[in-house]
Image (cartoon, rainbow, N blue to C red):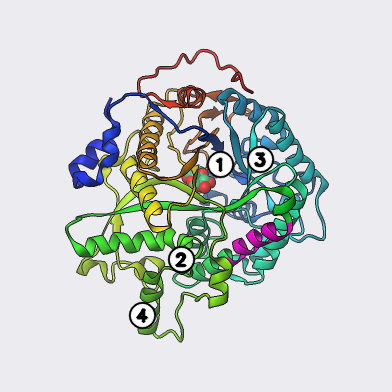
Amino acid sequence: MLWKGFLVCAALLALAECKAARSVGHEPRKFPDGFLFGTATASYQIEGAWDKDGKSPNIWDHMTHSDPCLIKDCSNGDVADDSYHLYKRDVEMMRELGIDYYRFSMSWTRLMPTSFSDYINPAGVEFYNNYINEMMKYNITPMVTLYHWDLPQKLQEMGGWTNPNIVDWYADYARTVYSLFGDRVKFWITMNEPNIVCYNGYGDTSMAPRLNLKGVAEYLCAKNLLMAHAKAWHIYDEEFRSTQGGTVSITLSSTWFEPEDKNNEDHVQAAEDSNQFDWGQYAHPIFSESGGFPPEMVKNIGAKSAAQGFARSRLPEFTEEEKAYVRGTSDYFGLNHYSSKLAYRNESAYGYHEAPSFFDDTDTVSYNLEEWKIGESDFVKVTPWGFYNILTKIRKDYNNPSVYITENGFATLGGLEDEDRITYYRSYLAAMLDAIDEGSDIKAYTAWSIMDNFEWMQGYTERFGLYEVDYSDPARPRTPRKSAFVYKEIVRTRTLDFDYEPDTTVMTIDEGH
Ligand code: BGC
């Protein structure tokens, strides 16, 4: 079966950019030796037990309780998948899939209910010890994200990521977590998707805390978050690495922006600028030779701020010392990727977005095409060529760093027969293999998600799981979808076979687990 993304790619874009299209040969393709497979979740999205055993509220508890119907189905994460109680079943699913590692996040307010290190909550420590030990018993490597969006509400009330003191607050949290679990956890991710934290939460209303302080707060957040990340990396490097021997990285969200017309220089520049603003904002300070925010951002935001009458650039600069402190603070490139957009710039792009704002600062317009959609959900469009393009750009721009794909996945509206998700996964894995064939050093692939979970503002309406979760049942049963069987076979054989048809009648534990 041909999948639509490639057809659209061929129809829309110059063929040279559609190299991933050659994956449509359907010869089974092997993954490189040592390549790792995992799945991912995040604390607020699965744990539930929002106030159990001493946990204090985070910004998602606060927001969903203050104004329940901000969430599409007026739901919240109070119970979610109840992994706080059902963690053994979670590990059983990992064993069924046969995955090498499991990426999950820790809840700051479960471990440190005051937000600070004056009190460590024993029940929180016990929960994560149990989760980690249960995984390790079955040969599944834990990969821990320190921060996946659930900031202590108390810290938010003190300005959250716009308050520079958060660099120390976060560093104390990181040090505590390394000391508690670092004897067993060797893969750390400091932050999940800084751009979503800062843009959606501070510059917009699409994530907690919905501050909507456009064109200013998201940039203050970005600098503080990068400094906090860097401090957590340095702490590990100086205080823990020699005894614990692990790695610390950051995971960036990334949309790929493709020029609407590749022969139009303005469109090409618009796409480049959009890539720099979207994920270069966080990649450049850490992975580039020169450090600091991307030059495109510094120039554009500086010029616009001056024209708008601000006394200084709305983008806080890094000092030379800070640039050096942040540069190189990631042991590999953690990449979350789902989809792409087309970008253009012409007269209409100037003044298209309200000003000041992040999008006005880019002077570009971007959109996706209806043809890229498959299935019912609007959430993720199928553009595997964009995955290939971003992996190629990372290889070229940042001297071929090791890349861990820490999320990739597809939403449906539910149901066990999820052909669209299978199509998505296969096409993106093929595009990733194309990049590997051309020299990209990609070490691991993580499917988002092992099971349905609280999908932020979409509540439980959008389903990303390889396993379906029944939210009408208090026992929150998890049932494998067809895609779970397909992923299991990919992991077992370390081969991408487009023609494989699973027997979905019985799910068994994988032999190695
Ligand atoms: C986030 C996840 C989220 C997923 C699907 C990623 O950006 O890290 O928390 O559920 O996208 O929207």
Say which amino acid is labelled 2: Glu
User: Is 213 left, or right, of 261 in this rendering?
Assistant: right
Of pointers 1 and 2, the one earlier in the residue sequence = 2
Residue hosting label 2: 289
First in sequence: mark 4 vs mark 1: 4
Residue 249: tell me if it is visible: yes
At mark 3, the secondary structure is loop
Name which residue lies at 24% across and 64% down: 345
Q: Quadrant of the C terminus?
A: top right
Q: Is mark 1 within 8 Å of ligand 1?
A: no
Query: Residue 454 got which mark?
Result: 1
Instruction: Answer whether labels 4 and 1 touch (C-beta < 8 Å).
Output: no
Considering only order in the chain, which callout, 3 or 4, is on the residue closer to the N terminus?
3
Task: Indicate the secondary structure of the residue bearing disc 1.
Answer: loop
Q: Earlier in the sequence, mark 3 or mark 2?
A: 3
Q: Residue at x 72, y 33 (%)?
A: 85
Looking at numbered disc 3 in the image, what kind of residue is underneath it?
Glu
Is residue 106 shown above or below 276? above
Marks 3 & 2, CB-CB < 8 Å contact: no
Q: Mark 4 = which residue? A: 303
Circle on res. 47 = 3
Residue type, numbered disc 1: Phe
Task: Tell which tag, 4 or 3, sits nearer the viewer.
Answer: 4
Report the span colored magenta. Answer: 227-239
The 10 Å Cα crowd at callout 2, few under 14, some 14 to 19, many 20 or more, is some
